[in-house]
Image (cartoon, helix red, strand yellow):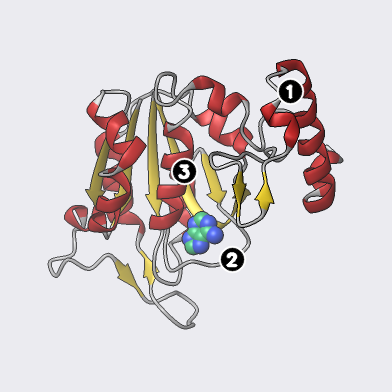
Amino acid sequence: MKIDILTLFPEMFSGAFTESILKRAIQNGKVEINLHNFRDFTDDPHGKVDDTPYGGGAGMVLAAQPIFDCVESIRTPESKVILLTPAGVPYKQRIAYDLSHEKHLIIICGHYEGFDERISSLADMEISIGDYVLTGGEIPAMVLTDSIVRLIPGVINERSHIEDSFNENYLLDYPTYTKPRVFRGMEVPEILLSGDHAKIDEWRYSESVKRTQERRPDLLEK
Ligand code: ADE
C-alpha cells in the first residue's frame, strides 16, 4: 500500500512513522508513506496557502489551488482521496478495515480555521476521528495511518487483530495479565492458570461481553 499525506507540517509525522510497528512496516516494504508539503504547490509568489473568508469572519481559510495541484500531481485511477475534518463521517474500525484493502490513499490534512469548500470535491471520503476539534488534520492522519497499516497482512500477528476491541463482534477486549501472579495483593484470575483453553476462551468471551455491557452498551445494540 502507498499512503500520500498532504500537510503544511511534515515534521510533525517524524516520531509517529520512525518508531515501533509503523517503522518496521515501512522498512519491510508493507507500506510506503510520502509526506507532501502543499505549500510547495502554491501559485502565490509569497508562498501563501490561505486567505480571508468570503463573507467575512475570523481566521484564515486554506485555499483550493495548492491542494488541487498537489493532489492532481499524485492521484491515479487507483487512489482514494480522504479529507480530514471534524465534519466528516465518524471514524470506526470498520472503515480502517475497508481502507486497509486499498492500494493508494491520499490523505489531506486541513488546518487553520477551515478550508475552501471546493476542496471537498477532490475527496472520495471525509472523515472525523471524533467529536472534538483539533488544530489540524495531522494527528487525525497519524490515527488513520496507524490504524490502517497495522491491518495490512504481515504487519502484526493476525490473531491480534482478530481479537481486537471493535472487531466484527463490536466487543471490547477482555482483560489480560502477565507475571507476577500476585502484584500488590491483586491476583491473576485462577482460570487463566488452569491450562484449560476451552474454559479460558469461554471466560474471555464472557468478560468481553460484561465489560462491553458496563462501559459501552451502545456497541451491544449493534
Ligand atoms: N481536524 C480538526 N479536528 C478534526 C477531527 N476531529 N477529525 C478529523 N480532522 C480534524
* Mark 2 C-beta closer than 8 Å to ligand 1: yes
Among the 4 quarters of the image, the one containing residue 153: top left
Say which element carries label 3: helix
Residue 135 appears at what percent x and percent y?
43, 69
Residue pictured at 36% horizontal, 56% vertical: 64
Q: Earlier in the sequence, mark 2 or mark 1?
A: 2
> Is 202 or 48 nearer to us in this picture?
202
Distance from Cα at disc 2 to Cα at disc 3: 16 Å
Residue 132's tag is 2
Distance from Cα at disc 2 to Cα at disc 1: 37 Å
Residue pictured at 43% horizontal, 41% vertical: 146
Residue 201's tag is 1
Residue 144's tag is 3
Question: In this orientation, does residue 32 appear?
Answer: no
Residue 176 appears at what percent x and percent y?
62, 39
Residue 101's tag is none
The N terminus lies in which quarter of the figure? top left
> Is 184 or 17 nearer to us in this picture?
184
Residue pictured at 73% horizontal, 24% vertical: 200
Dot in front, 2 or 1? 1
Distance from Cα at disc 1 to Cα at disc 3: 31 Å
What is the three-letter code of the residue carrying label 1? Answer: Asp
The C terminus lies in which quarter of the figure? top right
Dot in front, 1 or 3? 1
What is the three-letter code of the residue carrying label 2? Answer: Tyr
